[in-house]
Amino acid sequence: MMVVKRGAWLAGTALVLALSAPQAALADWRRAETAHFVVYSNGSERNLRDYAARLERFDALLRFVTNVPTNADGLRKLPVYLVENGRELRVVQPDLPEGVDGLYRASAFDIRAILVRGRRDDLLLHEYTHHYMSQTSPGSYPGWFREGYAEYFATATVDARGKSTVGLPDPGRLRTLQEQRWLSIPDLLTIDPMTLEGRGQRGVFYAQAWLLTHYLLNDGERQQRFGQYLLDLRNGSDPVEAFFTRMQTTPEALSRDLNAYMERGLRYAEINTPPLDPQMDVSQLPDSADDVLLIGLNIRERRPGTEDAALLAQARTAAARHPGDALALTVLANAEMTLGDPTAAEAALQQVLALEPDNVEALLMAARRRIETAEQTSDQPQMIATYREAQAFLRRAYTADPTDYRVLAEIAGIRRIASDYPTENDLTTWRMAVEHAPQVLNLRGDAAEAMIAAGLDDEAEAYLLPIANDPHGGRNATQARRRLAEIQARRAANGGPVTP
């Protein structure tokens, strides 16, 4: 089923997964739901269907290559938003640098991808590979491999007949490797790319990580040795010493081998997968979506107390323009709660829930509003009563969508003040939250804290290791490493084996 070719990749690059050409804005937002995605677009329906199908085929390719079942029952689907141009993209993320045509975000507030139609498919494929890797194999991988693996699949091609390629070289990465000074191999194996100065050095890191991953994955013996290396890391071995021991090489020899591998012409795989014509349901969003959908995504990421008068004014104007519209009222409620008047937010929420009793966003906001109120009161009976109101809204939200990790996290988090926390039910709720959003680092951290409190260090460690090894982990990674060190110390004190 797999044919490996050498040196013919330039012709193959014309097959790189691409969207239809940009089309004139129709001001009609549509929603396409497939097995693994919910795709929104304000372009043509044909473009939307084509993109959703391509995403499903890419997911199927990843599952085929990694031998993971395609059954997605019960797992959260990834929202993807397709916009017309960079201006619309920056409505959602105003501080994006010029030249950036898309973004992926996994946070406590949302997991979503947003992309300008027709541009930089490799960006979304790179980020979806991260998303998929965290979902299906959330083990402890070194940062360079996480990035190199995503780059390896970012140039994949798929079509409806099941003809696919994996591992097509990226001309930009090759140019970087040919023109820039390389990092030392020990630095590549251990460095956090976010600590490198300037985009140029970070570009070298990503290019070298991609080349090393490509080199390892295109040879069966090297794959096997790398698998043994991952086990060494899991058992606490030094990442540099263990790598060269397992690969039976030296930094200098490996650099020569990587250069030679690149100069000979990188190999890619042609793969025949079962043809796929994905099932999807397409629906029209209300007219209000043109006014509020993108600003709603912006507002969703903001914390209470954030000041942005323009966003608040837009939400209020849109709600007035679309009276009785549940989507406009939901965005207004979030805007008022975050940027404006919480009392007005409550009034908007009541209107939404009268129109749509199972609206998860409104139910979640109503619960969070009551949690904030309870945290600010010193009246114990009133506090308990308000927390119970919040729990009632969260139960309704969970019934409406049991895959929403935000709801699960609030259900578990609200129990922290209880004297018997964490119960087995609390632990199960945290496990379910992480299952639906393993990409959200602080969610893993919260779950790990609950496991530590329950004396389940092994399970806590499993949640913490991916955070500690995440190249973009920042303070979360630092905190995870601190917790892992504490787990090690407890094991050592009890005479048990020490792991990373």
Image (tube, rainbow, N blue to C red):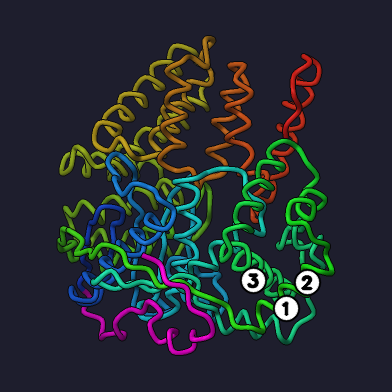
Report which quarter residue 314 is drawn in. bottom left
Secondary element type, mark 2: helix
Q: Is residue 4 magenta?
A: yes
Q: Amino acid at mark 2?
A: Ser
Q: Is residue 246 magenta?
A: no
Report which quarter residue 344 is drawn in. top left
Q: In the rendered view of the protein, which quadrant contains the C terminus?
A: top right
Q: Residue furthest bottom?
A: 11
* Residues at discs 3 and 2 in contact (Cβ within 8 Å): no
Secondary element type, mark 3: helix
Residue of label 2: 255
In the image, residue 239 lies at what x, y percent?
77, 49
Residue extent of the magenta highlight:
1-27
Secondary element type, mark 1: helix
Residue of label 3: 211
Report which quarter residue 360 is drawn in. top left
Residue 207 in view, yes or no = yes
Residue of label 1: 259
**In whole angstroms, how far apart are the C-alphas of marks 3 and 1?**
9 Å
N-term mark: 3 or 2? 3
In the image, residue 27 lies at what x, y percent?
22, 75
In the image, residue 350 lies at what x, y percent?
24, 39
* Residues at discs 1 and 2 in contact (Cβ within 8 Å): yes
* Residues at discs 3 and 1 in contact (Cβ within 8 Å): no
Report whether 369 appears left or right of 38: right
N-term mark: 3 or 1? 3
In percent of the image, x 59 and y 34: which residue is there?
462
